[in-house]
Each structure stands twice: as structure tokens, then as C-alpha cells.
Image (cartoon, rainbow, N blue to C red):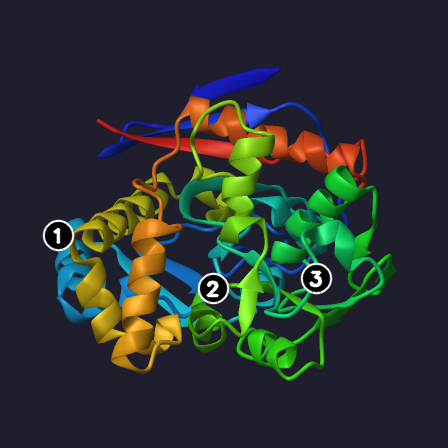
Amino acid sequence: MTSTRKAPPTAWKLAATVLAGGLALSACSPAASGGGDGEAKDANGAVNMVMAPDPVWKWMEDQGIKQEMEEEAGIQILTSSSWDEFGVYAGGHADVVSAASYEVPELEKQTGEKATIFGKFNSDRSILAVPADSTAKDLCDLKGKKIVTHSAVSITIMWGIYAKEFCDLDLRAGGGDFDVIVTDVQNSASLVERGDADAALLLPDFGIPQLSSGKLRPLYDAKSVSQIYGEEFGESPDTTHPQNNVFVARKAWVEKNPEEAAFLIKIWDRGVQEWAQNKEQIVEAYPEDFAAETPEEKKFILDWLDNTYDWFVPTTYLDQAWIDEETKLFELMKETGFVEEDVATPDFTIIEAE
């Protein structure tokens, strides 16, 4: 059952969509603007957000867009940059985190507090790549092989779901039918190139030298997790599912601070519009965020974005149709054993402009 409620009138309206089910959770650290008892406090016009280094955010700052929007709204977004967003948020050091939608059940388990997804940003762009001379044609052919990934959760969860669905195999860190090795995101492609691993669950922008030179060969026609999901499990041509970066906060924080939550989604929506209009300039300005150093590497990633897959969403705002499609992922996670049957489907909050 789905219930909808409206928050008090503000410059923006919040319609919270609560999906059925409850989850028994343990005590945890409070949020950045939470009290010692876990109760959310008034944000007072400031949002503490943790995220991985992001070129769109840098562009917004350097172009003066972020400052202009903050001054107009009277709200400030305070960001901390970390590849361990999950840990920073779970430790109570941020109000908002950018995380994969399929990580939210574990995030709630770690924090002991109900969370809500209230915006989207990046789809899952990860691919499966093998050495050029590998005979593997798909994930099933890699049973028993060494597969590197940059996280025990995140993209590994989705490829684990595919291993179960396509091959009836168990892919996870710390056991299963594959030898999964967790390493830094910057090292995944080079480990496969050197022969220290047989395959990589790879973010394409962190494997440009190996992919562009042909030393690594993507399987599944270089399709990303989200493209495969759309083909195999989706009911529409939408390739924004599943999300590798949604905006997540403790539900109590969003309910207590609707204006700050709405402003965060508004400013990031401006960001994806900037990306759509200035993609080439952003790659040129921040090549380090795409692991592109040479003109050839920049050209390669731009070609990938234009002709293979662009993982930035067209809008950060959620609607019910999108939520319904994303929610199906959690049923698939239950079917494949990645979450328990009694774990509640994550909560979503729809933010709408007046």
C-alpha cells in the first residue's frame, strides 16, 4: 500500500510516498543535524552533504552558479568529498548522502534510522570487462575466476543479482562462486591488464587507457548495468534504473527540513541541465574526474558518453512512475537473496515545483 502526504506549504511542495512495510533497526549515531536521541533538528538553512568527487558540482562552483542560487534561496550546501560516502553518512557526519538506491536497506540497517530517497543523479554505469584475449563471452563463463571491483556493495550487488539471474551463480565479496577482490577504483582496470585478475566490474571512466587501447574488452556489448536492467527487467526503454547515485537522507531530516531538501534537489537539477549543455567543456575542465589525461582519452570518454552510455539523468526530480519502476529492483533483490524477504522497500519522497 502506498500513502501520500503533503508537508506544510513552502516555496516547494513535498509529497512523501511511503511504501509499505516496516524494518526493525538497531540504535545508531545521530545525523549531522540530529539530536542525541536521533531526532532531527532544524537545518537552519544549511545542508551537510557527503559525495564522491563530482565534476558537475565543481562546474557549478567555478561558474558561480552554486553561490548565486544559494544567495537567492538563503540556503547553503556544505559538501565533503569522500569515496566512502556510505561510511561518512552512517557515522552520523552528514545530513544527505549520494548512494546507490539498492544500498539503502543496508544504510538503514547500519544507521538504525529510516531513510528516504528524494532525488536521483547517476545511473549505474558499471560494465564487465575482460582481457582482449579472454575467451569469456559472459559472466557465466567467469565462474571461479578472479573478478576485481571497487566495492563489496555498490556495483557488486547488481552484478551479483545478474550472476544469480543469468547463471544461477553466487557473486559476492568474501565467498560464492567467484573470487571477488575489492580494490581502489583507480586500480581495477590495471589489475586485469597486468594479468592479476581475470575480469573487472569497471566504471568505464576509470579504465580509459585499457578500453581505448583494446587491452580490455567489455562483455555484453559494453552495456552498463542500467542498460542491461532496462532490457532484461524494465518495462520501458528508460535506462535510468537502477540508480548508482540517489540523494538519501534520514526521513526525519527531510520531514523537518522540507525547504532545504527541496533546494538541494533544485540545485542538482540545475547541475544536470548544465551537464547536458556543457558536457564537453566539463570534461575538458575536470579531466581528473574522468581519469582522462590526454586529448585522445578525453575524446574517448566523450564518445562513450555520446554513443555508448551517458549515466547522468535528465532530471533529478522523482515522479511516481519512475519510483514504481525503481521499486521493482528491490523485489528482484529479494528474489535473488540480496535482501531478506521481510526488509521493507525503501521510502521515496517526491519533491515538486509549485
Instruction: Tell me the residue that label 1 is attached to.
Output: 72
Instruction: Tell me the residue that label 3 is attached to.
Output: 135
- Disc 1 packing (10 Å; few <14; some 14–19; many ≥20): few
| Mark in front: 2 vs 1 | 2
Residue 35: percent from left, percent from top: 56, 56
Horizontal placement of 223 versus 120: left or right? right
Q: Who is closer to the viewer here, 233 or 248? A: 233
- Disc 2 packing (10 Å; few <14; some 14–19; many ≥20): many
SS at mark 3 in the image: loop
In the rendering, which numbered label is found on residue 192?
A: none
In the rendering, which numbered label is found on residue 204?
A: 2
Query: Amino acid under label 2?
Result: Pro
Mark 3 or 1, nearer chain start:
1
Mark 3 or 2, nearer chain start:
3
Q: Who is closer to the viewer here, 256 or 170? A: 170
Residue 62: percent from left, percent from top: 17, 71
Q: Decide: marks 3, 1 in contact (CB < 8 A)?
A: no
SS at mark 2 in the image: helix
**What residue is shown at x 13% (from left), y 66% (from top)?**
64
Q: CA distance from mark 2 to mark 1?
A: 37 Å
SS at mark 1 in the image: helix
Query: Amino acid under label 3?
Result: Thr
Q: CA distance from mark 3 to mark 1?
A: 57 Å
